[in-house]
Amino acid sequence: MRKTLIGLLIAIIIFILLLPYYLGEAIATEFKAQLQNFNKSPDAIYASVINYQTHWFTTDATVLITQQTPIFLKQLNPQIKWPAQIVYQLQLTINHGPFVYINCPQLNVSGLFWTRGIATGTIKLISPKSDIIKSIQGLNQPIKVLLVVDMNGALQIFAKTGSYQLLTDQLALKFLGAKIQLLIDNASGISNVSHLQGKTIFYGLEAQFQQGKLIILPASLTYNYNTVNKLWLGKKTLTIPAISLISPQGKLLVSISNVNFATTREREANTLTVKQLLSIDHLIINNNVIKNIQAEFEINNVKIMPVIALQNIVRNVKGYSPQKANQNFLIEFAKLLTGVNVQLNYLQANFPFGTISMQGILTLPATVPVMPAPAKLKYLFNNAVGQLQIKMPITILQPGLFMQEPGPVLPVGTPVMTRPNFIDLMSALASSAYEKNYLIKENGQLIANLDYNQGALVANNIPVDFKLTVSSGQIKQ
């Protein structure tokens, strides 16, 4: 009996000692399989292993990732001569399971994991060299990454970027960095289908330009969706606690607090339905406060193939020149808009004088004649049909409502010029529309029923011919 127990104990010890080696071999097999699947992707991106060494408890891997330079990077700053391809180096050390202890305070990950393996390492830009993109500072900083492969095959990704700064003659843009946590699970066993769940935290953004300074405080993006052939279906939510626009003199021009924007995609056959929800607690413009902004949009009959084509153009899958990419973008964008139905289920906001609300619908033609893409876009909007109802309080017509921004203190007798703020403009617009019967009184409210048909706009059955000019502190029709 005693010998049996000792033998069993020895067998367990041998099994425990051998398990990391076999898990390392299993990781190598799966690593190569995943790499092959990755390289089958239609995207203009390719990964190649330049070093892979398996040890008993660890594996060292170096991977070069090459992709076609995205079009938007080439257009972001024409002064930067981007090469045709961008190359990254992924350097990993993989700790074999089944038990791995990790302490990574930079990514807020620590503890003992029951896992096939955990990889730690960095992603670094290899090409282009920093001297080519001098206006973008920080690109030479490596991105810290940590990968956890669960026993069921699910992959957890943790990453943290550095901060980056773009400097041009007109703009100084500083991105304070981001932290990413992502779970990828393709338990369905279908290689092109996976479930993604995670969160990205953006530490903040600062933009300095001639008109002032824009500050966006730390924001978060959460996502929970399935991807099918790189087309995501599910929900994303963006939350921004505060956005501020400050004048060159240090005056707060615009302040936005607690922005929440959620997008949901649902698929039916070969089309998508996109639903979007927006909420803002406060919007302050020149000391005027707008509260509780709520909106819901719905876009129906969005064709899937143009969506995928537009994604590939943006990622520059086929290495298009900017001119060719722009041409193809317009072609696919026209296909995307054909037959689309846009619904504004509601939009409402509480102004100092009361609540304004809207709802409406716009339907674009289902067929378009054969013509160049720019002409197709013009045809789509000229032949669209839509309705919009706007409701606002009668108090907007009150003469005493106007609030002028005071100018500097001047000597007595000096003519005072004031600049109308946005409430003045809204009130003047509503007053003029009411005089023209575009707005009518109904149940204690002002209501405009707008109809758009083949380029013509009608309000309460009256053709709209309306212009508003502002000059020298006066509002004129």
Image (cartoon, rainbow, N blue to C red):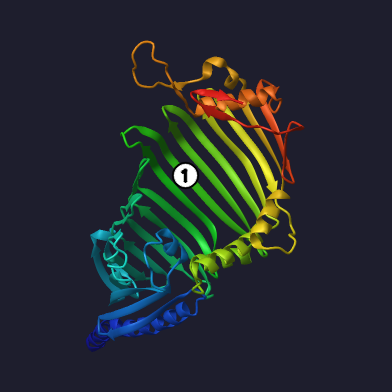
* Location of the N terminus (image quadrant): bottom left
Q: Which residue is mark 1?
A: 260
In x, y percent, where is residue 371?
71, 63
Q: Which residue is more in the foreground, 467 or 361? A: 467
Q: Is residue 263 above or below residue 346?
A: below
At 37% from the left edge and 39% from the top edge, which residue is drawn?
Answer: 244
At 67% from the left edge and 63% from the top edge, which residue is drawn?
Answer: 372
Tag 1's secondary structure?
Answer: strand
User: Outermost residue toward the right?
Assistant: 461
Place residue 448 in its image quadrant. top right
In x, y percent, where is residue 158?
34, 63
Residue 357 seen: yes
Residue 301 seen: no
Number of marks: 1
**Residue type of the residue flagged with mark 1:** Asn
Q: Is residue 177 above or below residue 212?
A: below
User: Outermost residue toward the front?
Assistant: 414
In x, y percent, where is residue 211?
38, 40
Number of residues whose C-alpha sits closer than 10 Å to that of mark 1, classed few (under 14), some (14–19) or many (20 or more): some
